[in-house]
Image (tube, rainbow, N blue to C red):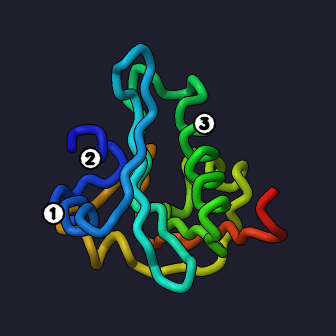
Amino acid sequence: MRLLLLADPSEDKVRSYLPRSKCFVASCGGVVVGACVVQPLGAAAYELMSIAIQPAHQKSGYGAALLQWVIDFFRKSGASQIEVGTGTFGYQLAFYQRQGFRVTAIDHDFFVKNYPEPIFEDGIQLFDMLRLTLRYTGSVA
């Protein structure tokens, strides 16, 4: 739970989506350094609910490797797309875009309406959530 709270500060929210989700981990030397949670949306669509890497292992490629593994897993499973929601700025936005996710919608005031305390990123309060989608094309090789 401590690891997942790095990506989503609400333990209640995390606990609410865990029962219907698949969880994946990245490890190094038998130690879990990252975790990713994905839940089905229906019709071969999935949502990446959370991805987090232990602070000591961030910026070491674990997050990108874990996300790429998850993307490949769902592609091979016959998924049509994966969605994710993130803030409107910061490294997370570029992280998802580097993996092929594209902005498809804006959920205005999401962070204000869904979290009891304000959430800040780099000293700036988050208000809106960007919805990004990675659509699979072609067949599985």
Marks 2 and 3, the one that precedes in the sequence = 2
Q: Label 1 to label 2, Cα distance in Å?
A: 10 Å
Taking the spot 48% from the left edge, 69% from the top edge, the residue there is 47
Q: Mark 1 points at which residue?
A: 12
Residue type highlighted by circle 2: Leu
Marks 1 and 2, the one that precedes in the sequence = 2
Taking the spot 62% from the left edge, 54% from the top edge, the residue there is 71
Taking the spot 42% from the left edge, 46% from the top edge, the residue there is 24
Point out the frontmost of discs 3 and 1.
3
Marks 3 and 1, the one that precedes in the sequence = 1
Q: Mark 3 points at which residue?
A: 65
Q: Are marks 1 and 2 in contact (CB under 8 Å)?
A: no
Label 1: which secondary element: helix
Q: How many residues crowd mark 1 within 10 Å: few (<14), some (14–19), many (20+)?
A: few
Q: Name the residue under label 2.
A: 5
> Which image quadrant: the N terminus?
top left
* Residue 134 locus on image (x, y percent): 67, 66
Label 3: which secondary element: helix
The numbered disc on residue 139 is none
Left or right, 136 with respect to 58, comes to: right
Label 2: which secondary element: helix
Residue type highlighted by circle 3: Ala
Q: Label 2 to label 3, Cα distance in Å?
A: 20 Å
Depth check: give the residue in front, 126 or 102. Answer: 102
Reply above or below: 120 against 49: above
Residue at the limit of the structure toward the top, as seen here:
29
Reply above or below: 23 against 137: above
Depth check: give the residue in front, 97 or 33. Answer: 33
Reply above or below: 99 against 39: above
Point out the frontmost of discs 2 and 3.
3
Q: How many residues crowd mark 3 within 10 Å: few (<14), some (14–19), many (20+)?
A: few
Tell me where residue 77 sits by quadrant: bottom right
